[in-house]
Structures are given as C-alpha cells and as structure tokens.
Amino acid sequence: MSSEYNYLCKYIIIGDGGVGKSNLLLRYAHGQFNPEYQVTIGVEFGIKDVEIGNNTFRIQIWDTAGQENFKSITRSYFKNSICAIICYDITRRDSFDNVSSWIEDCKAQCYKSVHMVLVGNKTDLNERRVVTTDEGKELADKLGISFYETSAKTGENVEKVFEDSLNEISKQIEQGKYDFEDECGISKGTKISKENKKKKKKCC
C-alpha cells in the first residue's frame, strides 16, 4: 500500500457482540470471512485505499467490541470518527432493539457531523430472519440515516456500505462542510490530487 493519500478518514463499526462487525471489516479490507466466532478484545483495525475522482481516500476502520465490559475502552474510539456503521444481526431481535442505545452513544461521543449508516448483517441466514427489511428501513428513515442489509459471508452489499458513505463524505469535502482543524475524523495527506497536478503542469 502506498504511503501517499489525499485524505485519511476514520470509520468505526459499532453494535452488539456477535453481529458480524469483525467479519464486515475482514470482508471489506481483505476479501475474507472467518466462520469461527471470536470475541473482539477492545478494538481491531484495518485500512483500505479508495480512488474517488482525482483523490485517494485512505479509510481507517476501527472494529469495536460489543460486550458491555469493553464499552469503557471502545467509547474512546468513537471520538473523531467521520463515519459510524451501526450493525445488527437480522437473526437476533435483541441486537436490533439495542441499535437506539448505540446511536445515543454515537451522538454523545462522535464528531458532531458524523455520517451514520445502519447495517442489518447476515442476509445469508435469511431463513432464520426475525428482523424484517422494512423494520430496518423504517428505523433508518426515522433516524435520518442510510440503511443496507449485508452478508459478510457472501460479500453482499459490503463494499457498497463503505463506498457509498465515502462518496457522500467526498461530496461534503468538496462543499467545504468539514473543519479539518476540528478533529472531524478526516485529515489531509501529502499526495497531490491528479487535478492539482494538471494545474501545476499548466502553470509551469
């Protein structure tokens, strides 16, 4: 991976334990899936570079533990996040019911203009579904945030979750919506965009 990028964006994945947060990260960052459930101790981390227009965005993704006894550790990672992915398991009603609590934590701890995405994971287990797609959409509409259903196992919609949100963040950057001095979860890199390179050549 190149050491150069135009923007570094901090993402956080939150939600109850066992909803598939670690596998969402693993699938997106490495194209892999681990069928064995392993409790995340504190946080795990992954990165991926994405090209949008003339810029390279480096997504720094923090996967947090969902268990209550780790919350004092994971809350510190909420700060300065530009995007929060709130995840639940479509086969577990309790994980969906707890979304509101995770949203409240997010609002209290994250950057004021954090981009939030609601994700119902494990569509590969559709025969065991207890939370309907309409319920997920209704909650997301009520919260005014984006909504997707995914399968970390098959990869369904996983890239879409990250890259749709990044496209929206890119638009907000172009519109000057973020204050880079305000620890907004985005920092500038050293890479010169293709557009600015062209301008530099013309000037010479």
Image (tube, grey):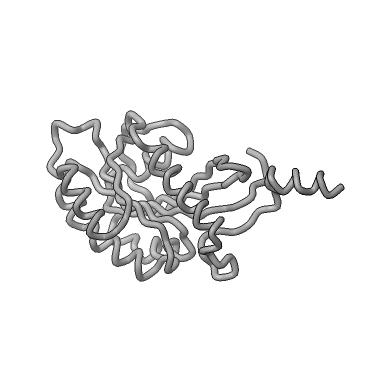
Q: Position of residue 58 (x, y in %)?
A: 57, 47
User: Left or right of 78: which side holds 191?
Assistant: right
User: Left or right of 54: which side holds 10?
Assistant: left
Instruction: Kindly give the residue lying farthest to the top in the view shown.
Output: 154
Q: Position of residue 92 (x, y in %)?
A: 17, 45
Q: Position of residue 25 (x, y in %)?
A: 42, 42
User: Left or right of 151: which side holds 95?
Assistant: left
In terms of depth relative to the viewer, which is nearer, 110 or 203?
Answer: 203
In terms of depth relative to the viewer, which is nearer, 107 or 173?
Answer: 173
Residue 146, compared with residue 176, is above or below; it is above
Mark count: 0
Residue 49 seen anywhere in this rendered image of the structure: no
Residue 13 seen anywhere in this rendered image of the structure: yes
The residue drawn where x is 29% and y is 58% is 144
Instruction: Kindly give the residue lying farthest to the front in the view shown.
Output: 202
Q: Position of residue 161 (x, y in %)?
A: 38, 43
The residue drawn where x is 32% and y is 66% is 105
Instruction: Kindly give the residue lying farthest to the right in the view shown.
Output: 204
In terms of depth relative to the viewer, which is nearer, 24 or 168?
Answer: 168
The residue drawn where x is 56% and y is 67% is 179
The N terminus lies in which quarter of the figure?
top right
The residue drawn where x is 16% and y is 49% is 135
User: Left or right of 19: which side holds 82?
Assistant: right
